[in-house]
Image (spheres, grey):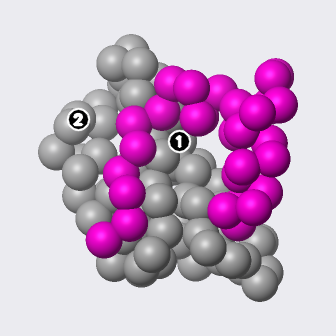
Amino acid sequence: MIDDATIQKAVGLLQQAAPGSTIIVFGSCARGEVTEDSDLDVLVVEPTVNDQWDEMVRLRDVLSPLGIPADVLVVSQKTFEYWAETPNTVLYEASREGRVFHAI
């Protein structure tokens, strides 16, 4: 199972790999409902994003040494600000229930 120490390690790795970004852990890990079938849902909000797909793959690879299942979404700050106010979207839910780790 994914514990809080593993979440902290994941956030630290992502902060190092994407400096200036805000990391939001959402889903079961944010709600405290982790089971052995849970994955780590992470939203990385970067100041700007050139190639969203490549960046998601790159950051998911950053987490691979942890040996946990993880879904990594990457969006720009502008995209996040728009969709975080739109109900029934992933960004809306992440902005409401997520554990936010600000840029270092």
**Residue behind mark 2:** 3
| Residue behind mark 1 | 41
| Residue 94 location (% of width, % of height) | 59, 34
Where in the figure is residue 23, as x and y percent of width and height?
45, 55
Q: Are marks 1 and 2 in contact (CB under 8 Å)?
A: no
- Please state if 30 lies on the left or on the right of 86 as rendered: left
Nearer to me, 92 or 14: 92
Q: Residues within 10 Å of mark 1 (few under 14, many from 20)?
A: some
**Where's the N terminus, which quadrant?**
top left
Q: Position of residue 53 (x, y in %)?
A: 77, 72
Q: Residue furthest top?
A: 33
Task: Tell me the element at label 1.
Answer: strand
Going from N to C along the chain, the mark reached first, 1 or 2, is 2
Q: Is residue 91 above or below residue 93?
A: below
Image: 22 above or below 56: above
Task: Decide if residue 100 is in sight here.
Answer: yes
| Residue 37 visible in the snapshot | no
The range drawn in magenta is 75-104
Residue 10, quarter of the rendered image: bottom left
Q: Residue at x 58, y 35 (%)?
A: 95
Q: Is residue 36 left or right of residue 74?
A: left
Task: Give the quadrant of the C terminus.
Answer: bottom left
Q: Amino acid at mark 1?
A: Asp
Q: Assess whether residue 87 is covered by the magenta stretch.
A: yes
Residue found at x 70% / y 31%: 92
For residue 76, what is the image quadrant?
Answer: bottom right
Is 51 left or right of 2, judged from the image as shown?
right
Per the rendering, the mark at residue 78 is none
Say which residue appears at 77% left-offset and 84% top-offset: 50
Disc 2 residue type (three-letter): Asp
**Residue 21 appears at what percent x and percent y?**
49, 68
